[in-house]
Amino acid sequence: MTFSRKTPTLMHDGGRFLRLVASLCVFVALLVPATGAGATSRIKDIAEFEGIRDNMLVGYGLVVGLNGTGDTLNNSPFTRQSLEAMLERLGVNTRDQNLKTENSAAVMVTATLPAFARQGGRIDITVSALGDASNLLGGTLLVTPLLGADGEVYAVAQGSVTVAGFSAGGAAETVTKGVPTSGRIANGAIVEREVAFELASLDTIHIMLRNPDLTTSRRVAGAVNAYFGNNAARALDPSTIAVAMPSGAGVDRVSLITDIEQLRVEPDQIARVIIDEQSGVIVIGQNVRVDTVAIAQGNLTVRVTETPQVSQPAPFSENGETVVVPRTDVTIDEDKDKRLAVLQQGVSLQDLVDGLNALGIGPRDMIAILQAIKAAGALQAEIELM
């Protein structure tokens, strides 16, 4: 009877246990795809498509309406010539006149023409002083044609300049925040010419990797082929993948490219260590490995301190003179407390960083150590100096 009374309780506990196990399995199953996808990236984030690109524009113009912070015409002859030419076009003759205005400034106007920008659309522009103007605050840019690399006018800019920085000061002190000689004009240029490119008529689309790599190129081609179900994509080189678009009148190439952008692949790069000796910045890639190597780091510091003393003769002494007696203190620090550390073969990035940090090594010394490890043939990575 005792066994029969406990049987429902055991069955009830077993059911709770099974439900708990089932819940854990579902939770683990949900975590596994997320963990696997964490190392992958969309093709959209690692590559660009042929024809979908920006174009740089540049122009030369005049900013007027400044409060005495513009170019000094005696020091900026190009500003004087621009003012005279502009006024002549408006019917005002100022040749051979002594212009002394400081309310205008010559500027360079730059902009980026987005892909497939249509005529009549607006784009943002950046205005930068070319002469000795001290502030563009409150200025207005006059009509400025913006040229492309082919010399054609693709946009025309005009508008009030917005400056984020400022400069103020007096006779003894000047305060400057940001860069007051550079500003922006939101939607300050109107597109006048379009870049001709028919994306919908292409039979083959080229995907260009931002970081060329043979393995990544092959993986992108494999992901596209798996999506299409055929061998439509093939890797041409480490940076280019050619994708043959399906033929037919009803094929929507824009939709196909959109679907390709969302495919996920795992990028691959060679093991690389980036070093900027000027700023002391070190970036170590994930795949960097080190063979067995012993490292010792120590600095020889010689400190020389001069504390001269003045020696004077005794009071009421007939013979003697005041002289300066040199006192020199020399201290030598050989960092004898530094020890030899051993890094085992195949250590990971974390082990390498932990080992170097254990030696109390700063970024400057770490740069020299990494270069020495590379010279010894123990660093299985490429060192790139910026």
Image: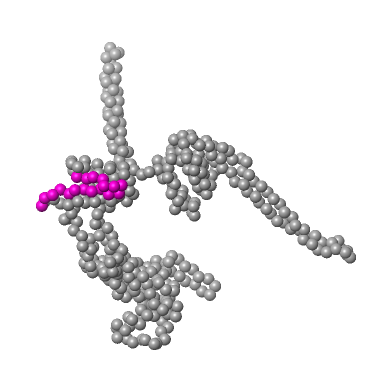
**Relative vertical location of residue 246 with respect to residue 151 in this rendering, above or below:** above
Image side of residue 44 versus residue 289, left or right = left
**Relative vertical location of residue 272 with respect to residue 327 in this rendering, above or below:** above
Residue 185 appears in the rendering: no
Identify the magenta region.
232-249
Whole-percent x, y for residue 191 in the image: 24, 67
Q: Quadrant of residue 288?
A: top left
Whole-percent x, y for residue 48 in the image: 27, 52
Q: Nearer the viewer, residue 159 or 131?
A: 131
Whole-percent x, y for residue 178 in the image: 43, 65
Q: Nearer the viewer, residue 173 or 119?
A: 119
Magenta stretch holds residue 248: yes
Residue at image location 30% in from the left, 25% down from the top: 17
**Relative vertical location of residue 20 with respect to residue 372 in this rendering, above or below:** above
Magenta stretch holds residue 385: no
Residue at image location 42% in from the left, 69% down from the top: 180
